[in-house]
Amino acid sequence: AQKVTQAQTEISVVEKEDVTLDCVYETRDTTYYLFWYKQPPSGELVFLIRRNSFDEQNEISGRYSWNFQKSTSSFNFTITASQVVDSAVYFCALSEVTGGGNKLTFGTGTQLKVEL
Amino acid sequence: SQTIHQWPATLVQPVGSPLSLECTVEGTSNPNLYWYRQAAGRGLQLLFYSVGIGQISSEVPQNLSASRPQDRQFILSSKKLLLSDSGFYLCAWSVYRVISSYEQYFGPGTRLTVT
């Protein structure tokens, strides 16, 4: 069975600090996809990034960066120079391809609070 | 561009009453559709998914059912609500592409309170 673990339940930082959100996954599939989503207080989940299991290159998008390490089954997310608007719950997810569709297994989320 | 709508946005219903939540997607054809529930706390639980009209897969046996009467319409229903059905219900869609694009896009959600 697939599993995603986000051990950090809540993180509080002061604005402009860097923060890393951890994600560890388990799967028996050789082909899989990993995702990060942001859930602001409004509730809607916002897609941030997709990474497939064959692409271990790290990715940077503005203040966001992702570190995918297959050897440790981790897909960590770093926010550089955090801002108050980054306050949200962040979910890591793992896909399972089945019958033409795909199901996502979500971690329990990390609540990030960025304070002035 | 694609958009996903859910309604109602909020709902307060008494125990034992019926439920109907609707989700529609615009700007895409033959999407995969999903219903999730987010109960107290933050975990997301997949309830149902559908890869086509009339095709529904249930992930968790419970008091709810889903239907897909049209290609881009997904409905979540219950004949008699329970207190435990309270939560935040999210609809999502994805499109399978040969070049591996599996992300799901979520609607704004419906906050259901059963009293």
Image: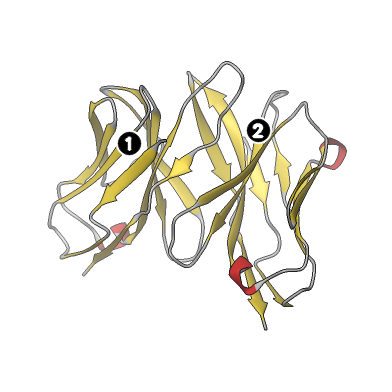
C-alpha span from label 2 to label 1: 23 Å
Amino acid under disc 2: Tyr
Residue B51 vs A62, above or below: the answer is above
Q: Quadrant of residue B38?
A: bottom left
Q: Secondary structure at mark 2?
A: strand
Residue B61 vs A115, above or below: the answer is above
- Same chain? Circles 2 and 1: no
* Disc 1 residue crowd, few under 14, some 14–19, many 20+, Cα 10 Å: many
Q: Return the chain for callout 1.
A: B
Q: Where is the N terminus of chain B found, in terms of image quarters?
A: top left
Q: Residue at x 23, y 55 (%)?
A: B8
Residue where numbered disc 2 is placed: A33
Amino acid under disc 1: Val
Residue B3 relative to residue B12: left or right: right
Residue B9 in the image, given as x and y percentages of width and height: 27, 59
Residue B50 - label: none
Q: Nearer the viewer, residue B33 or B64?
A: B33
Instruction: Give the number of callouts.
Output: 2
Q: Quadrant of residue B34?
A: top left
Residue where numbered disc 1 is placed: B25
Which label lies toward us, 2 or 1? 1
Instruction: Pick out the residue farthest to the top.
Output: B98
Residue A71 in the image, given as x and y percentages of width and height: 87, 37
Q: Residue at x 41, y 60 (%)?
A: B39
Q: Residue at x 67, y 29 (%)?
A: A32
Residue B1 relative to residue B74: left or right: right
